[in-house]
Amino acid sequence: HHATADSKPVDAREITEQAKELSGFREPTEISTPVFTGRLQRDGYTIEKYFVQGEGDYVIPFLLFSPAGPSDKLILYLHPLGKSAEAAPGGEIEWFVKLGFSVVAPDLAGMGEMGTGDLKGDAFIGGFSHNIWYSALLVGRSIAGLHAGDIIRVIKSLKINPQTKIHGVARKEMASALLHASAFFPDIQEIALINPLLSYRSLVSTKFYHSRFITGAVPGCVGHSHLPELAASLAPRKILMINPVNGMDQNAEAPEIEESLSVVHSAYKQQGSEGSFMLHREIATEKIRE
């Protein structure tokens, strides 16, 4: 049963501890120095290519976009199609760079260059292998938890100046990884979630749910309606949520949004920071701005 907004205060520490356990998150300890593999000069900014050692026996390639002038704000940019999805001239990343942000765009395990590989398994649905998810489940891990650790690893490897403000931007199923990483790593100060899955409950209660969201789903957390709880644990940090979707990857309806996000609203209210949680629905894609 979903706790009503007024029943009990949101305990951020409890949510975070529970999320670490359920997601099989491992705190990144040894952070290697990124290996530089090339530089590209574009109009008004540079792109540097790096890779850094991931948690296991694999690397995380990432692109670092730097505006010409000094920048004290960094965006961690997570796109389900990987780092190159919006990296072209005129793409979304360039738009952020022109606003003065540095942007780091990684290919986490299973994305982009670190793509799905040959393992399709017997449950390969809509371009997504459920077998990878089951394998993670069997060893007490989750893809979201692994991604969260690697996100923190990439940020730490950059040895960012402490004055730099770190933002996160994630689309679709990457919202889950960003929410987990932000809950476990307070240095990420504000996040924007674009078309995020509203809640795991929405997946479970949808017969023909969209397979893209299986990669961000954490086993065993449905009773804790986990994604809204994680968002609630971030209060009073800024969250911008744009066009949340249901398990079928369609814009969620107002009543479902209200019910799922009541826990977030109440957490922000408790902190006296209602203005820091911003929800926009039915926004045309081209209108999405900081």
Image: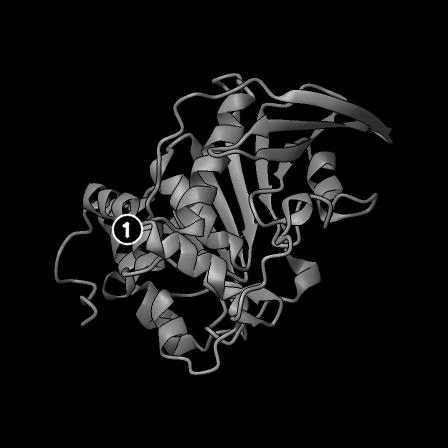
Q: Is residue 285 left or right of residue 142?
A: right
The residue positioned farthest toward the left in the image shown: 7
In which quadrant of the rendered view does residue 237 lie? Answer: top left
Q: Is residue 28 left or right of residue 52?
A: left
Q: Is residue 201 above or below residue 148?
A: below
Please name the amino acid that badge 1 sits on.
Answer: Leu
Mark 1 nearby-residue class (10 Å; few <14, some 14–19, many ≥20): some
In this view, the residue in front, 260 or 98, is 260
Circle 1: element type: helix
In the picture of the structure, the residue carrying the numbered disc 1 is 22
Residue 19 position, x and y percent, is: 29, 48
Residue 145 position, x and y percent, is: 39, 46
User: What residue is rendered at 36% in x and 48% in y?
Assistant: 141
Q: Is residue 152 above or below residue 122?
A: above
For residue 142, say whether it is visible.
Answer: yes
Residue 238 position, x and y percent, is: 42, 44
For residue 237, say whether it is visible.
Answer: no
Q: Is residue 249 above or below residue 35?
A: below
